[in-house]
Amino acid sequence: MKLKNKVVYITGASGGIGEAMARKTAAAGASVVLLARREEKLKTLAAELRDTYGTEALYSVLDVSDTGAIEPVFRELLAKTGRIDVLINNAGFGVFKTVEDSALKEMEKMFKVNVFGLIGCTKAVLPAMRAQGSGHVINIASQAGKIATPKSSLYSATKHAVLGFSNSLRMECKGTGIQVTTVNPGPIRTDFFDTADESGEYTKNVERWMLTPEFVAEKVVQSIVHYKREINLPRWMNAGSTVYQLAPGLIEKLAGNAFNKK
C-alpha cells in the first residue's frame, strides 16, 4: 500500500496505459479519479477498482480538447476529493501521415488534445498543489518527442511541446513541493495504433519491440513512490534518441530506411 491516502487523477483513463495505471495505483492503495470521454468504460472501471481493491474511485466525463470544460470539471472533483497528490496527464492520440496528407482539422485536434488539454489540466490543479505544499504532475510524452521520424511529424511536434512544457514547469515549481515527471515510452501495445496506423504497417514492423501497458504503468507508479525526472522506455530506444540529439545528421543518414517503416 505504497500510495495509501494519496489521491491520483488520471486523464485518458478509459483504456490503454491510462486504464493500466488506474489499476496499478488503486492496487498500491491510492484513491483514484478517472477522466476520459467514454462514460460507460469509466463507470465500469471505477466499480472494478472499488470492488477489487477497496479503494475510493470517482470518475468524470471529460474531453480535454474542450479546454473550456477542464476547469469546471476539476473544480467539482477537487471539492469532492479535498486534495490532489498526483495528476497523470495521459490523454492523447496520434495519426501517422505526412504533413502533405494530413488535414488541418486533424492537426488542430491533435494539438488540442496532446498539448492544450494537457496544459489546461495542469493549470487546473497547480493552485491546489501549491496551497497544500506538495504534488506531482506526470506527463505522458513519447520517444517521438525526442526523435522525429517521417509520417509522425505532427505527433512528434505535440510530444516535443509536452517535453518543453514539462521542463519549464519543473523549474517554475522549484521550491513549491511540486514535482514534474515526463514519461517517454516507445510503442505500446494498445488501441492507440487503431487510429495512428490504419494500414497496420508500422505495427507489424515494431510489434516485437512493443511495450505492454502494464509494464509502463508499473514504472509510472514506481516514479510516484521514488521520484524520477524522466522515465525513458525501453532503454535501448532512449539510447538511440540520445545519440540522435548529438549527431542527428549522421543518424538520419544511417537509419533512414528504418525511420521510413510506417
Image (cartoon, helix red, strand yellow):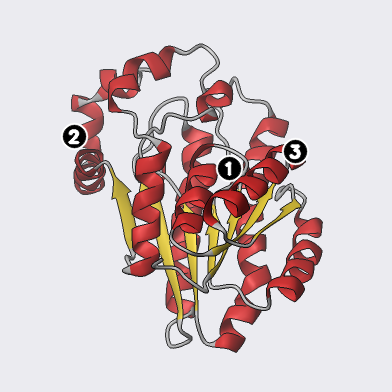
Mark number, residue 238: none
Amino acid at the residue labelled 1: Gly
Classify mark 1: residues with Cα within 10 Å, few (<14), some (14-19) or many (20+): many
Q: Quadrant of residue 8?
A: bottom right
Secondary structure of the residue carrying tag 3 is helix
Residue 202 coordinates in the image, percent (x, y): 41, 18
The residue at 18%/26% (across/down) is 254
Amino acid at the residue labelled 3: Glu
Instruction: Give the number of the mark in front: 1 or 2.
Output: 1
Classify mark 3: residues with Cα within 10 Å, few (<14), some (14-19) or many (20+): few
Question: Relative to 222, is 208 above or below?
Answer: above
Mark number, residue 40: 3
Residue 171 coordinates in the image, percent (x, y): 42, 77
Question: Relative to 143, is 167 above or below?
Answer: below
Amino acid at the residue labelled 2: Leu
Residue that label 1 marks: 92
Instruction: Give the number of the mark in front: 1 or 3.
Output: 3
Q: Is residue 76 visible?
A: yes
Q: Is residue 214 left or right of residue 85?
A: left
Secondary structure of the residue carrying tag 1 is loop
User: N-terminal of the two: label 2 or label 3?
Assistant: 3
Is the C terminus in the top left, top right, bottom left or bottom right quadrant?
top left
The residue at 33%/16% (across/down) is 205
Q: Is residue 248 left or right of residue 134?
A: left
User: N-terminal of the two: label 1 or label 2?
Assistant: 1
The residue at 18%/34% (across/down) is 250
Residue that label 2 marks: 250
Is the N terminus in the top left, top right, bottom left or bottom right quadrant?
bottom left
Question: Relative to 46, is 258 above or below?
Answer: above
